[in-house]
Each structure stands twice: as structure tokens, then as C-alpha cells.
């Protein structure tokens, strides 16, 4: 009997590249969980703790959350998902990448490329389900009923860091701090590079084609 392939995938890309959406689609197809560092942090942020307040002060201003908080969260997630995992939004700086590389050896790194103009267009219209985390866009991927999640019926929200000021800061961080991580992984493992400006379905199909090679 053929054994099921074990996938340990990292999805990299700028804000609005669609990495969260693609990680979720891959998760359904490959039947392994997609873990988003942004979601893990937002979950922590909702708790009534001092740490939650600290996390909010970074996220809401478009800044990276301190290393120690993120590394603890990712370690827990990996321990829980030993049979395969898709990681979205981690690592995002070289400090995270060098430590992470010591205990997580990816089978594939997917890099979704997108222009800055498209990023801004997408993030400005993005809506999120606070309950099941499904991601929508008011024009390109709207819910069937305005502002209501198709999957769980919760009222959609607009993220606090999807404001023009926070978007600008997040893009600066991606260009200065996360790009070296992309380079590092490219050199070490090679990248599956995908143009992210096609439709969600097309990008997904392209990724699946490359993964099956
Ligand atoms: P995302 O949902 O991936 O757009 O992430 C939203 C926000 O969460 C980022 O702007 C950061 O404030 C924080 N965040 C996500 N991933 C990381 C990470 N690897 N390191 C530090 N902060 C992060």
C-alpha cells in the first residue's frame, strides 16, 4: 500500500499575496492543517491578559510581534501537527528563520509573488470572518450575502491593520525584513515561485501542479 506523502510546507509572500487563502485551499486538498502565525497571534490578542495587550500594540500598528512570543506559538503548533502542516506567515525575519530552520525542515517552500499596487488594492477591500477565519474581498471574492460569512454565518470584519498607514508599514517590513528570509530559503531549499495575480482558483491549480511533480 502506498504511504501518504508527508507535507511540511511554508507559504511565503507579501501581505495580500493570497498566502492565507492558498494555505487554506491546500489544507482542504491535502487534508493537513494550515497554521497562520497572524491567526495564532490574533487568538492570543483576544485573551484578557497583559501579553494580549502587548501583542495588540504590535499587530494593530503593522509591526512584527517580538520573537519569543512567535517562536513559542510555532513550536506548539508543530508539536500538535506532526503528520503534516502548512505554515503561513512564519518565519518573517532572519532571527526567526535561523532558529526555525534548526527544528523544522520543510518539504516545500511556496513563494507567492505580487506587486505592491495589487497588494494595496486587495487589502483595502479585504474582509475576514472572525469565527472560522475565511477570507473574502468585497469585489474579487465577495460572500453570497453582504458582510456575512458563507461558511459559518458570522458577521465579517475589517482587520485593524488593513488601514492605509498599517499596510504601508507592513509592506516596508516585508521588503526590508522578510525578503532576506525568502532569499535564505531559496538558496537552501529552492522555491516554488507562483505569480499571485491570477484568480484564486488558477493560483491554487498552479500550486497543486508544482507540488505533484
Ligand atoms: P498576517 O495575518 O500574516 O497579515 O499577520 C498580521 C500581523 O501579525 C503582522 O502584521 C504582525 O504584526 C503579526 N505577525 C504575523 N506573523 C508574524 C511573525 N512571524 N513574526 C512577528 N509578527 C508576526
Image (cartoon, grey):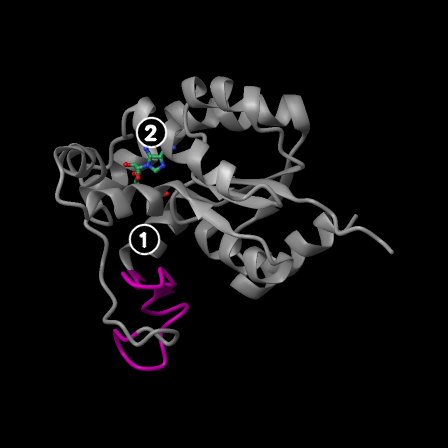
* First of labels 1, 2 by sequence position: 1
Q: Please tell me whether mark 2 sits on a helix, a strand or a loop.
A: helix
- Residue at the spot 31% in from the left edge and 68% down from the top edge: 138
Instruction: Judge left or right: residue 213 versus residue 182.
Output: right
Whole-percent x and y of residue 22? 52, 55
Magenta-tinted stretch = 126-148
- Residue at the spot 43% in from the left edge and 36% down from the top edge: 76
User: Up-down: is 141 above or below 58?
Assistant: below
**Main secondary structure type of the part rendered in magenta:** loop
Q: Is mark 1 within 8 Å of ligand 1?
A: no
Q: Is mark 2 within 8 Å of ligand 1?
A: yes
- Residue at the spot 35% in from the left edge and 30% down from the top edge: 70
Q: Which mark is residue 123?
A: 1
Considering the image in quadrants, where does the N terminus appear?
bottom right
Examine the structure image and report whether residue 131 is included in the region drawn in magenta. Answer: yes
- Residue at the spot 54% in from the left edge and 45% down from the top edge: 86
Whole-percent x and y of residue 117? 37, 47
Near-viewer residue (129 or 119)? 129
Read off the residue under disc 2: 173
Whole-percent x and y of residue 144? 36, 81
| Disc 1 from disc 2: Cα separation | 16 Å
Q: Please tell me whether mark 1 sits on a helix, a strand or a loop.
A: helix
Near-viewer residue (121 or 136)? 136
User: Up-down: is 99 above or below 60?
Assistant: above
Amino acid at each position: 500500500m502506498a504511504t501518504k506523502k508527508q507535507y511540511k510546507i511554508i507559504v511565503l509572500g507579501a501581505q495580500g499575496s493570497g498566502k492565507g487563502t492558498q494555505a487554506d485551499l491546500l489544507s482542504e486538498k491535502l487534508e493537513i492543517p494550515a497554521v497562520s502565525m497572524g491567526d495564532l497571534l490574533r487568538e492570543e490578542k483576544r485573551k484578557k491578559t497583559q501579553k494580549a495587550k502587548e501583542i495588540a500594540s504590535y499587530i494593530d500598528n503593522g509591526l512584527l510581534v517580538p520573537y519569543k512570543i512567535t517562536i513559542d506559538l510555532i513550536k506548539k503548533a508543530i508539536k500538535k501537527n506532526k503528520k503534516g502542516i502548512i505554515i503561513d506567515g512564519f518565519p518573517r525575519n532572519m532571527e526567526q528563520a535561523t532558529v526555525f530552520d534548526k527544528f523544522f525542515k520543510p518539504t516545500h517552500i511556496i513563494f507567492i509573488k505580487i506587486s505592491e499596487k495589487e497588494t494595496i488594492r486587495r487589502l483595502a477591500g479585504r474582509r475576514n470572518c472572525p469565527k472560522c477565519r475565511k477570507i473574502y474581498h468585497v469585489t474579487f471574492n465577495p460572500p453570497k450575502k453582504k458582510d456575512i460569512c458563507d461558511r459559518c454565518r458570522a458577521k465579517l470584519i475589517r482587520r485593524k491593520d488593513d488601514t492605509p498607514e498599517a499596510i504601508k508599514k507592513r509592506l516596508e517590513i516585508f521588503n526590508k525584513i522578510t525578503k532576506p528570509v525568502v532569499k535564505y530559503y531559496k538558496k537552501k531549499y529552492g522555491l516554488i515561485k507562483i505569480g499571485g495575480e491570477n484568480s484564486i482558483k488558477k493560483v491554487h491549480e498552479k500550486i497543486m501542479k508544482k507540488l505533484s511533480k
